[in-house]
Image: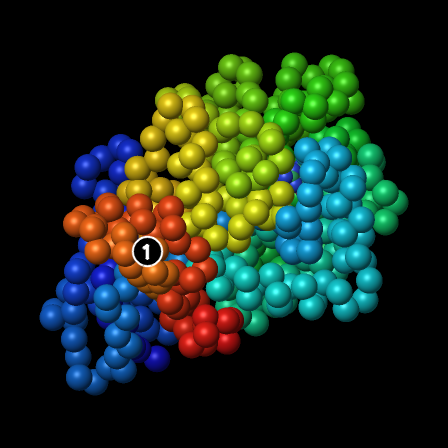
Amino acid sequence: MRQLIRGRTLSFHADPAETENAFTFHEDGAIITRDGLIEAVGDYAALRDPDLTEINHRPHLILPGFIDTHIHFPQVQVIASWGAQLLDWLNTYTFPEESRFGQQGHAPAMAEHFLDLLLAHGTTTAAAFCSVHPQSAEALFAAAGSRNMAMVAGKVMMDRNAPPAVLDTPQQGYDDSKALIEKWHRHGRQRYAITPRFAITSTPEQLAMTGQLAREYPDCHIQTHLSENRDEIAYTLSLYPGARDYLDIYESHGLLGERLLLGHSIHLEPREIARMAETRSRAIFCPTSNLFLGSGLFDEAGLRAAGVPTGIATDVGGGTSYSMLQTLNEGYKILQLRGQKLHPFAAFHWATRGNARALGLEDEIGTLAPGTMADLVVLDSRATPAMALRMARAETLAEELFILQILGDDRAIAQTYVAGQPMLDRNRKAA
Ligand code: GUN
Ligand code: ZN
């Protein structure tokens, strides 16, 4: 099936922080999709074809769908829980809620809500933590597969320091993860992430098992948490007294490398930063979560200067919005507090191609390059009265993007396409 989608197209082919000529923009642009892939992108005048079905999104912008590199699927009913920092928040709200995912029928129902929410916010791919129960990952992969969405996901492995209803054992966690990898990894668009929750909830025996999985399946992602909050770091180091630092716990179990996604990565030692750069391990910035849980301020410029690759993510339900626009908004403010700047071009690059690169998936998603999947977001810069009023004064594309970044949320998502299919109905609910 071929179709032409018309709009103001914007795609990054390089990092705007590194080069001036980083993107291609067509004011009257078009994308031709064929069987879920982008076949061509360019000026509408050059691509128009009377034989093609045409969908006209002008004056809206069309970008590659947003990518969220760190989110917790079983926390859809944890988001907006009051008054705690990380460790209390986990014990008070999160672990009890995640225990419900062991109940029959709960995970499949929540998986549909979760994917509806992602699409309503313009997110077409996420790296998602599931609960400890294999059926949570099973449910998410099945639901994503039926929508043809590319998910990176894994059941969390955790065998201590949490209630029994959310614990596995080193052997069970290994066996369940392995069975899920065999069934779902590279099944359609699905990819498995080996997911030790973090060092506090994994014994050394369990981390040894995650290292074994990582060796057996070197093209699986690995996702975990690193140095989010000071109390977490102190407790972690008390549990691993032989470790040189927090990162060393993961390093000594063979987990570092370009497939490793390290959520938060805030309070880092110089040695940790150097090792992350050398091994190309990814630091994932979670701005709304870091502010909500009072965790700390991510050092984007410092990590960039050191050569650490980064991604940006919502971290729902520690994070407070599914919107990558709102995530960029809070990210801008965190960098302000550090005396750093997040330019709108850098911001939109980060949420699309930058995050695709963080996941190693830039050949499939994150740009409008021909041959990649037609996962798209259509953005309405005048979605609210406040945005429309401000847009009346906007003169440049950068200004327009910044208005979306600061004032935009799910109301600014006019449509989301997955593999060329529109996923939202006219009320912007997942269709
Ligand atoms: N560290 C370990 N688990 C979690 C979690 O669920 N959310 C956040 N923000 N940090 C974590
Ligand atoms: Zn997290």
Viewer can see residue 62: no
Q: Is residue 399 above or below residue 309?
A: below
Residue 187: x, y in percent? 57, 62
Task: Give the left or right position of residue 431, taking residue 59 as reference.
Answer: right
Q: Is residue 107 above or below residue 154?
A: below
> 93 or 262: which is nearer to us?
93
Q: Of all residues shown, which one is farthest toward the right?
A: 164
> 325 or 26: which is nearer to us?
325
| Amino acid at dot 1 | Met
Residue 87: x, y in percent? 73, 33
- What colour scheme was applied to this rendering of the protein? rainbow
Viewer can see residue 391: yes
Q: Secondary structure at mark 1?
A: helix
Q: Residue at (81%, 66%) from the top-left corner?
A: 104
Q: Residue at (26%, 74%) from the top-left corner?
A: 56
Task: Give the left or right position of residue 153, taking residue 234 as reference.
Answer: left
Task: Give the left or right position of residue 133, taking residue 43 as reference.
Answer: right
Q: Is residue 409 above or below residue 431?
A: above
- Which image quadrant is residue 89 in? top right
**Quadrant of the image containing the N terminus:** bottom left
Residue 316: x, y in percent? 59, 48
> 291 or 393: which is nearer to us?
393
Ligand 1 contact, mark 1 (Cβ < 8 Å): no
Q: Please state the total of marks drawn on the protein image.
A: 1
Name the residue tied to disc 1. 387
Q: Residue at (39%, 68%) from the top-left corner?
A: 415
Category of crowding for the residue at label 1, using alpha-carbon neighbours closer than 10 angstroms: few (below 14), some (14–19), many (at least 20): some
Q: Of all residues shown, which one is farthest toward the left?
A: 45
Q: Residue at (46%, 40%) from the top-left corner?
A: 330
Residue 350: x, y in percent? 38, 43
